[in-house]
Each structure stands twice: as C-alpha cells, then as structure tokens.
Amino acid sequence: SLFSIAPGGKTLMTHFYTRKGDDGTTGVLGPGRVSKTDARMEALGSVDEASAALGMVRSFALGQDTAALVMQAQRDLYGLMGEVAATPENAETFRAITPQRVAWLEAQIDALSAQVSLPREFIVPGDTRPGAFLALARTVVRRAERRVAVLVEAGELQNPELLRYLNRLSSLCFVLELYESQAAGRAGPTLAKD
C-alpha cells in the first residue's frame, strides 16, 4: 500500500522504493533472494513486458471483443508470473495456468479464425495501430516463452501448461492482428511479397 495510517488517524504516504535490491538481488515467492540476472528474473521480466505490450493493444483496440480478450490474457499472465516467481517448493501454491486456461485460449483463437482470412504469405506489421501493437506483443510473448523454456529445461519449473499457454497466446496475438486490421476496414494485411 502506498498509504498507511499513523496513530491518531493521520495518513502517511509510504515510499515507492525499498532499497532491498540495491545489492543486485531480488526477492522470490519463497525463502531467499536471487541475482537480478538469474534466468528466473529474465523470464519474469519478459512476461511482464508481454503484459505491458498487451496493455498497449488494449488501449487502442478497435474490435468489439479485443480489449476483453486481452484483459483476460493479462490477468492470466499475472498468475503465470506468480508461478514463475515461486521457488520450486512453493510452485503448487501459486499454480494459476491450468489445461483449462490453455483450452480457453484455443477456443478464442478458433472463434476468431472463423472471422478472418488467414494470409498465405508472411505479413508486414503496421497496417493499423492496434495490429502493430499486437505484432509487437506477439514477439515479446515469444521471447517470454523462450525464457520460460530455459527454466523448464533446467527443471526449475514443472508445469508444462506454462509453455503451452505462452505458445497459444502468441497465436492469439497473430489472429487478433488480422481481426484488428479487418475491424479497421482493411481488406487484408500487407504481405511481405507483393
């Protein structure tokens, strides 16, 4: 909390900083601290960036359902970050990404795929502002997936749904990019080959 109540009912503002990370370490969800260069922190940072990129999408979305879908994905990413931040002995306590969350993403992708034409060639991002942000979000989600894969391969994360979720989320971003181009009245995306 940014505010606390002092004796006598006076409201005091607390600091936005703790100074605990000044030594190059950061806390995890469990005992101990790790280096800010730890693979777990790299994964968390990438997932956090993915959520921020999705926030840009949400702020500019044109399609009727885009903002709501993206908000749910952002909420899922916060749950995913909790699991990644947890020490192995605490991971089960923070498990948020389940097969049901992956199935939800797949259902959204399938529903949107029925509404757009899939290009037969690579597309060049930037036809619309929300579409460009979705292309950026897709690439950041892919990076987050790679960073989480490092932890899975090292045995530090046991939940296979984390990688499945990030993989499907990048697919959702791609389909939403096409959907947003269509919502903006564009006949189709700009193709890499013309």
Image (spheres, rainbow, N blue to C red):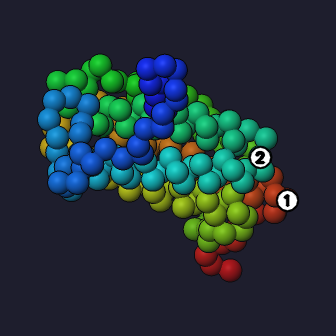
Image coordinates of residue 94 in percent, x first then y, are 33, 24
What residue is shown at x 75% (from left), y 58% (from top)?
181
What residue is shown at x 37% (from left), y 37% (from top)?
81
Q: For mark 1, does the 10 Å Cα neighbourhood hold few (<14), some (14 to 19), or many (20 or more) residues?
A: few
Which residue sits furthest right?
185
What residue is shown at x 68% (from left), y 36% (from top)?
68
Q: Earlier along the polypeptide chain: callout 1 or callout 2?
A: 2
Say what amino acid the circle numbered 1 marks: Gly
| 134 is higher (above) or lower (below) than 96 | below
In the rendered structure, the answer to whether residue 124 lies left or right of residue 33 reads right
Q: Which residue is mark 2?
A: 63
Q: Which residue is mark 1?
A: 185
| 163 is higher (above) or lower (below) than 143 | above
Q: Nearer the viewer, residue 96 or 16?
A: 16
In the rendered structure, the answer to whether residue 39 lies left or right of residue 116 reads left
Q: Nearer the viewer, residue 176 or 91?
A: 91
Circle 1 — which element? loop
Mark 1 and mark 2: span between their CA atoms? 11 Å
Image coordinates of residue 101 in percent, x first then y, are 48, 27
Q: Which mark is residue 171?
A: none
